Amino acid sequence: MKLLQLTDLHVSSVPDHSLLDTRDRLERCIRSIRSYHADADLCIITGDLADDGSAQSYGLLKEMLSELAVPVRLTIGNHDIRRNFQESFPDNPRDENGFTQFVIDMGDTRIIVLDTLAEGKIYGWLCDKRMRWLDRELGNAGGRDVYIFMHHPAFPIGLRHHQKIGLVQSQEFIRVCTRHGNVRRIFAGHVHAETNVRSGNLYMSICRGVSQHLLFDQLNANATYIAHAPAYNVILADEHGEAIHFYDLMHESGVVGTSMLPPELEWTGELA
Ligand SMILES: [Fe+2]
Ligand SMILES: [Fe+2]
């Protein structure tokens, strides 16, 4: 199974809304996916889809994603406005309470996508309804391993700037996931930096994302962002586990050399 994770697109219909041309950066990622990863089974975009949450920005995003050539599902982040998003993407699934969270079963794997948006707040929120829904969907996974995709990091990541803007209910989240014991990995966004974290038996990978990048500065209360190459994650999974490839568009800067393996060291086609 091959999954793609894109995050933090921050697309805006207003051309000079930020210093970055987020539209151009997403277009480059879409071109890259069409060229190299059109065989992916699914692309999941984990929130901060539109920088201003406006219907106009979602309209633009929808138009752009029609070129992706891979099935795509989305969830929302703190920059999004749930109602505008859902009106613009009526076919994107939601739960019985109207939240943008849903389940996709693919063979022996269950993908759970969560909605951690608290409207108007930067931090992530899973209210009782959403947490109960998660508890239920972990409980009826029927022996499948589970990947969880969500915008906000599920637990602390050791950065001062992010200490209070992750998921507020992280302890409850950890309790629920640990009780079921079937969560293989959590994929998040929001940080704008490539970060891997473990809490107990829970593993979380945060994707750097398409728009601006956080400069690593552990104890700084404020965040500094830089504009390096846009990036997304390519997740190769089988019954043994998963390999997560951080795929940025550095190659657009030019290739300076190649290395060829002798025939006896060539790939056998197995991940392990
Ligand atoms: Fe973001
Ligand atoms: Fe965010």
Image (cartoon, helix red, strand yellow):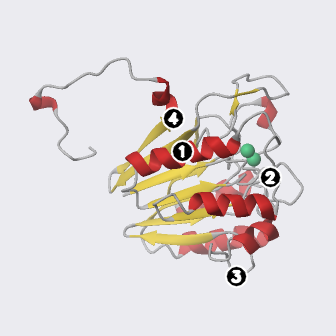
Distance from Cα at disc 2 to Cα at disc 3: 23 Å
At which x and y percent is residue 36?
38, 46
44 relative to 208, above or below:
below
Question: Can residue 182 be spotted in the picture?
Answer: no
Mark before the other along the chain sequence, 2 or 3: 2
Mark before the other along the chain sequence, 1 or 3: 1
Q: Nearer the viewer, mark 4 or mark 1?
A: 1
Q: At 89% from the left edge and 56% from the top edge, which residue is drawn? A: 120
Contact? badges 1 and 3 (CB < 8 Å):
no
Amino acid at pointer 1: Cys
Mark 1 lies on residue: 29
If the image is split into quadrants, where does the N terminus sit? bottom left
At which x and y percent is residue 86?
73, 72
Residue 243 left/right relative to 198: left
Mark 2 lies on residue: 79
- View extreme (left): residue: 264
Distance from Cα at disc 1 to Cα at disc 2: 20 Å
Distance from Cα at disc 4 to Cα at disc 3: 36 Å
Mark 4 lies on residue: 248
SS assignment at label 4? strand
Task: Give whichever of 123, 45 is nearer the camera.
Answer: 45
The verdict on label 2 being within 8 Å of ligand 2 is: yes
Q: Nearer the viewer, mark 4 or mark 3?
A: 4
Residue 150 left/right relative to 162: left
